[in-house]
Image: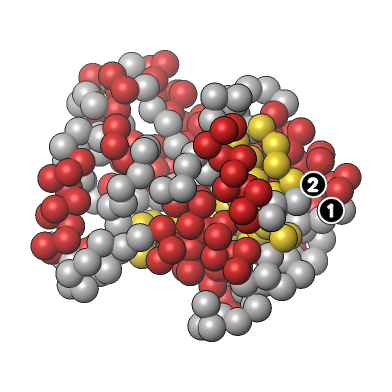
Amino acid sequence: MDLLGSALKGKRALVLGIANEHSIAYGCARIMRRLGAELAVTYLNEKARPHVEPLAEALGAGIFAPCDVSREGELDAVFARIEKEWGGLDVALHSIAFAPKEDLQGRLVDSSAEGFKLAMDISCHSFIRMARLAEPLMGSGGTLMAMSYHGADKVVPNYNLMGPVKAALESAVRYLAYELGPKDIRVHAVSPGPLKTRAASGLKDFDVLLSEATQRAPIGELVDIDDVGLTTAFLATPFARRLTGMTVYVDGGLSIMA
């Protein structure tokens, strides 16, 4: 981690979306912690808690709280605790996405209105809600980040419903960057290449996607959660102080290939 030294020392970072040790959010939290950040970590519910709590303890997370963004008041409660215990916030990372299996694995044209709305609320609008809650706590500026995927920009077979949802998320990032820029709050989407995570396992023929990614990426290797973590850490440091509104690809160059 000598690349960035202690570039996040003294920074307070909230990480939403850790499910287990394979989660992208965990890779991000781990790198931020190694670079000196103080962490707040959330878990989805009591079923998820036993999988996340040991990770939060290993990270030395000062705040550990439940957060199901689909349940009214839970996200607000996390920010209320951050305000009470920390008084402010420097970084907030959103790594949450969901769509009902029948909508995710079916054609977009056949998706249900209910499934589409739920996917949009959890995967996109919750990031906007997070930004609204973070804004008053970032009096000295800060960084907001959301996780996207190449399927937001190009058609990726079997990504289906999540393509339009992630496209909305990336657009929201740009508008939030514009609105919050005067307060020195920078906003980014980070777009990792295919990763073996629990969320990705819900995609149809995901193993085929992984194999093709390895073959087609110029670097010839899949990225891992630490690669994504290093990128998010960089975006949260002063080294990226003039960057905002971007979708940053961490995919070994896969996205440039035809």
Label 1: few (<14), some (14–19) or many (≥20) C-alpha neighbours in 10 Å: some
Amino acid identity at mark 1:
Trp
The residue labelled by disc 1 is 86
Tag 2 near tag 1, CB within 8 Å: yes
Residue at the image position 62 percent from the left and 72 percent from the top: 35
The correct choice, above or below, for 66 with respect to 57 in the image is: above
Relative horizontal placement of residue 147, taking residue 186 as reference (left or right)? left
Mark 2 — residue?
82
What is the distance, in whole Å, between disc 2 and disc 1 at their CAs?
5 Å
The residue under the point 64% across, 77% down is 7
Q: Looking at the picture, how far across and down is residue 32, in whole percent?
A: 59, 64
Q: Secondary structure at mark 2?
A: helix
Q: Residue at x 41, y 48 (%)?
A: 22
Is residue 244 visible in this depiction of the protein? no
2 and 115: which is toward the camera: 2
Q: In the image, 233: left or right of 252?
A: right
Q: Position of residue 105 (x, y in %)?
A: 24, 26
Image point (42%, 16%), residue name: 114
Q: Nearer the viewer, residue 128 or 214?
A: 214
User: Above or below — where is 202 with respect to 22?
Assistant: above
Residue 244 or 81: which is nearer the viewer? 81
Relative height, residue 164 to residue 14 (above, below): above
* Residue 212, percent from left and from top: 12, 54
Can see residue 197? yes
Q: How far from the left and from the top, in percent, is residue 57? A: 65, 49
- In the image, is 119 to the left or to the right of 7? left
Identified by mark 2, the residue type is: Ile
From the image, which quarter does the C terminus lie in?
bottom left
